[in-house]
Amino acid sequence: MGDVYAGPSRDTVSRAADLMDAYPGQITPNFANSLVEMSDELEIDPMWLANQMDAETGGTFSTTQKNRAGSGAVGLIQFMPSTAARLAGESGFVDFQPKVDSRGREYHTSDQKRDATKFFSEMDEDMQLHMVWRYLSPYRGKMKSPGDLGLAVFFPRALGEGRDFDIEDWYRKNRPKRLEAFMRQNKGIRTAGDYLDLVESRARHTRRRIERTLEEGTRTEGLWPLTHTPESRTKYVYPEHRIQMQLEPKPRPKPEPKSGSGSSENAVTIEGITYIFSDTGEITLQGE
């Protein structure tokens, strides 16, 4: 199965704290750590992804969030039923393997799309984050800005086509039966530029929120305590291991004697648990 996941690095936890400052009380430490790790794999800023999820879920960051405009989408980046069925099929779930029509074209039935939406809404955070990673992976290297990430989620055909790309016209020519629903569910968005302006507006809002946190002196210091138990936990690893694996319990090593004044830059204790950082960035947990 390859290398065992050893926990978030010091740098990951530090950047995860930035996300926690931007969205206090909305995301957990583990969720923030996972966003940073996944964003590194996707070559994007984790704050971009957090902002996108905030917008898609209306601030809930919930895997069960249903689309308020009635599109049938669900989850962290509002997976459409057809997208959910495709990703589930690609992940190897038997019930979501595509059918093949008389012309050799693959498709998913209405029942599969409906069941996929339910399946996604029942996923835990780790599993749905894996689906987010799977969805965005084809665009790695193409998402150079928050707007690019937003278009990859909202309308990937417009990615790299410039602000003047006419989404309404594309629907009129390629999906005329869905044009009315698209315009109703996405009022005010006709071109890629319209959507990019919306993304930038969200980014400004997040920057102001972080600036207020700094001004008020409530910024997070140190490490956020992890919510899993030190003995064992379940983790999705990106992208080498696309399966969920249970990590074996690890014996807790005895604390090493500290030199000098007794302090060490490689260990931090929070709520009775000591996080010891190795030179390779791995974390060992000690404590009660």
Image: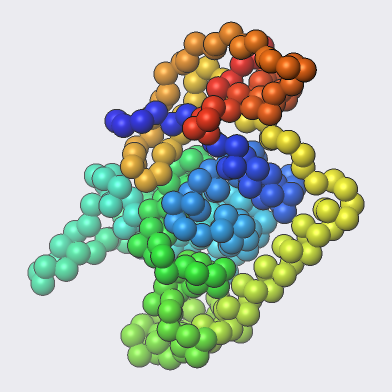
Q: Residue furthest right?
A: 216
Q: Is residue 15 visible?
A: yes
Q: Residue at x 50, y 90 (%)?
A: 164
Foreground residue, 139 or 281?
281
Q: Quadrant of the C terminus?
A: top right
Foreground residue, 198 or 168?
198
Q: How is the image coloured?
A: rainbow
Q: Quadrant of the N terminus?
A: top left
Quarter assignment of residue 197: bottom right
Q: Residue at x 46, y 89 (%)?
A: 166
> As drawn, is 205 to the left or to the right of 231?
right
Residue 65 x %, y %:
57, 54
Q: Residue at x 88, y 55 (%)?
A: 215
Residue 195 x %, y %:
57, 78
Q: Residue furthest front?
A: 260
> As drawn, is 33 to the left or to the right of 92?
right
Quarter assignment of residue 152: bottom left
